[in-house]
Image (tube, rainbow, N blue to C red):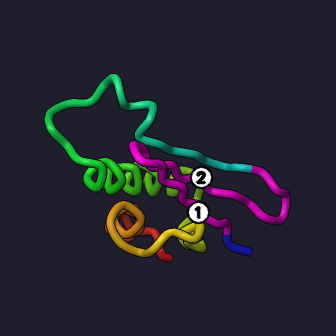
């Protein structure tokens, strides 16, 4: 069974976590909240979500996971949610 990437977005930040539904445990999590203080330049929320997707993809590859289910959590597939998914795809993860 494939792990699930669950996405949540607040007004300011985007969060994503990889969940193994068989064991009910979170394998990897990323957010742009942690990088709030280390923000460089003038990047917007969509750009940060895209870089979150790429960072999540790198962590997935280190664990040997190449295919995941994408759970948008009820959010529409545009803006930050779409940018995060495209960041995953660009880095080689199949959704």
Which residue corresponds to the image point at 31% horizontal and 48% vertical from the top-left?
48
Could you tell whether 73 is left or right of 12 in the image?
right
Q: Nearer the viewer, residue 75 or 15?
A: 75
Q: Which image quadrant for residue 42?
A: top left
Q: Is residue 6 magenta-colored?
A: yes
Magenta region, mostly helix, strand or loop? strand
Measured from the top left, where is residue 21 in percent x and y? 78, 64
Could you tell whether 5 is left or right of 14 in the image?
right
Q: Nearer the viewer, residue 59 or 43?
A: 43
Which residue corresponds to the image point at 45% horizontal and 57% vertical from the top-left?
57
Magenta part of the chain = 3-25
Q: Is residue 18 magenta-colored?
A: yes
Do callouts 1 and 2 mark residues in contact (Cβ within 8 Å)? yes
**Which numbered dot is residue 5?**
1
Say whether disc 1 or disc 2 marks the residue closer to the N-terminus.
Answer: 1
Answer few, some or many: residues within 10 Å of disc 1's Cα (few below 14, many 20 plus, some between 14 and 19). Answer: many
Q: Secondary structure at mark 1?
A: strand
Where is 34 relative to 8, above or below? above
Measured from the top left, where is residue 50 in percent x and y? 32, 56
Disc 2: which residue: 17
Q: Which image quadrant for residue 40?
A: top left
Q: Secondary structure at mark 2?
A: strand
Which residue corresponds to the image point at 38% horizontal and 31% vertical from the top-left?
35
Alpha carbon separation for disc pair 1 and 2 = 6 Å
Q: Nearer the viewer, residue 5 or 42?
A: 42
């Amino acid at each position: 069974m494939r792990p699930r990437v669950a996405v949540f977005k607040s007004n300011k930040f985007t969060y994503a976590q990889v969940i193994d539904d068989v064991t009910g445990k979170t394998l990897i999590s990323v957010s742009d909240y942690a990088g709030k203080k280390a923000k460089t330049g003038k990047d917007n929320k969509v750009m940060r979500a895209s870089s979150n997707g790429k960072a999540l993809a790198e962590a997935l590859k280190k664990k040997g996971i190449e295919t995941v289910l994408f759970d948008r959590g009820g959010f529409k597939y545009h803006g930050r949610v779409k940018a995060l998914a495209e960041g995953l795809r660009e880095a080689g993860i199949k959704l």
